[in-house]
Amino acid sequence: MLLRQFKNPIFAILVACAVVAGFFQQPEQAVVILSMIAIAVVLGFFNEYKAEKIVEDLRRKVSIRAVVTRDGKSREIGSREVVPGDVVSVYVGDIVPADMRIVESKDLQANESTLTGESFPVEKSPNSLDLQQPTPMQLINYLFMGTVIAYGSGKGVVLCTGRNTEFGSISRSLIRSHPETEFQKGVKSYGTMLLTLTMALTIGIFGVNAALGHPIIDSLLFSLAVAVGLVPELMPAIVTISLSQGARRMAKVKTVVKRLVSIEDFGNMNILCADKTGTMTEGQIVLKEYCSLSDEKDPRILSYSLLCNAAVVGERITGNPMDVAIWEYAKENGIQDAIESYVQVDEIPFDYQRRIMSTVVNKEQKLTLISKGAPESIVEKCKQVEGRTESLDSILESINNKMTDLASAGYRTLAVAYRTVDNKDSYSVEDESNLTLLGFLIFTDPPKKDAHEAIAKLREMGVNVKILTGDTELVAAKICKDIKVPVKKVIRGSELSQMSSVEIRKAVEEADIFALVTPEQKLDIMKALRENGHVVGFLGDGVNDAPALYEADVGI
């Protein structure tokens, strides 16, 4: 960090001037010049060192612990101590400490947004898979380092740790020197020009004086005096002081500036590339709406989904993210009181084979079995649709079309169905039959409330926003529409992979959304924009964004 402060061509000129001044018995000049260098170096080092310490302190506060079983005994250790072969137990809220093959699970779901950018949790199970050359995200019997357990619990055998994990493979791409930012290029270009001009004038003036017959020593002293006069000794110190002042102002609004040079680039930025999940969106699931197949809001859909719900309701609602979202929606809209007259009689727990949860409730001596789950699983158990006289088979196509349209727009859905049942001691999965399809629950990851305002301000300042996401183009386009980002063209990752570097440089100027892109493709987009002469910022929060953050003039 200290050596990095000296990477400035102007310093080379100033050191040369100080040496010359000392050689010709001008110690005062030498001390002044060296003092200017020292001020610039010390200030730059102090600010960057302080920022690094803040980040390191934050890192320590969020150190990850893991519950491992060794020699038949369970104990909690730091995640750095986990090794291949350990059996690790994971629970809701845990950050997975390594890449693991799942051997046991109970309703296990993992949020893999740090790797994939997808905010909805992924269902996990220990079942073996038959896949040819699978991508990591297809391995639903694996847990990956850095992902978060959203629901349930499980155990896994550690296969890879550290840089050998999927998380680590992305970090390996960062083992290189930081690319020069536009500001650094500008300073270097100015310093090189100054150095060339100084050398040319010094040699030229010395040559002319010598040719005119002036004493050699006097000619040399005169040319060196011109050289010293050309060099702005205070410039490095002034630049560093200005950047340091900017860093202090940023610190007052709780923003850590890790590298001082990024302050100037931040101000000069004309394109901001941003991830979608957790950056433009809240990064959490909410219930957007509930409706019947005819798009009517039947209140029973919501009340039945509260009755058939595995969330733990207390001061804080915890559990399956979708069940939690249903409760939070009900509380916000004051609807939870609608279920007070019901008494739960029995429950048939959710499992990943059925992908359904059911409860039996009693109201005024009438027993009702309520089922909630994946639409395709619920529809299989139904014989009719609420409010429709046609057979289920005749309207199956319209149900499938509705599900396809919602999925294409980036929504997740659950279906709710019910039937009246007879009183008996216990109920089982066999009772989940001849149901009536009541309606659907529609979930989304909504845009941040202030995203529209922020993007409008950026546009006023001449900063164009481009979205780079691992999600589909339809989902990204919808978010852009919600936050009023104009979209001229969308390019998919599969299209980028077929392009040459020249074609990519052209494509990045035309497109506003890059969908289904990999971390490596995000990096290619950043390089292309910078090669086109833009000062580029990248805003992201997942490890899948790390290569692009590293390449950008400003990584946020």
Image (cartoon, grey):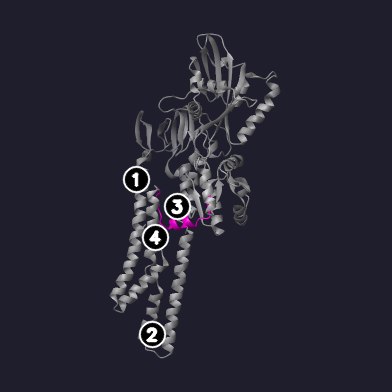
**Tag 1: amino acid:** Asp
How far from the left and from the top, in percent, is residue 546?
48, 48
Q: Amino acid at mark 2?
A: Ser
- State which mark lies toward you, 3 or 2: 2
Q: Which label was assigned to residue 175?
A: 3
- Residue position for label 4: 242
> Which numbered disc flags the more N-terminal residue, 2 or 4?
2
Give residue 328's mark.
Answer: none
Instruction: Answer whether residue 264 is magenta in the image.
Output: yes
Residue 76 image offset from top left, x and y in percent: 35, 33
Q: Secondary structure at mark 1?
A: helix
Element under disc 4: helix
The stretch of residues the image draws in magenta is 255-273
Q: Earlier in the sequence, mark 1 or mark 4?
A: 1
Q: In 3D space, how far apart are the residues under numbered discs 3 and 4 (Cα atoms)?
A: 30 Å
Cα distance between the residues tagged 2 and 4: 38 Å
In terms of sequence position, does the residue under pointer 3 or pointer 2 come before the other? Answer: 3
3 or 1: mark nearer the eye: 1
What residue is shown with label 2? 219
- Residue 85: name its quadrant: top left
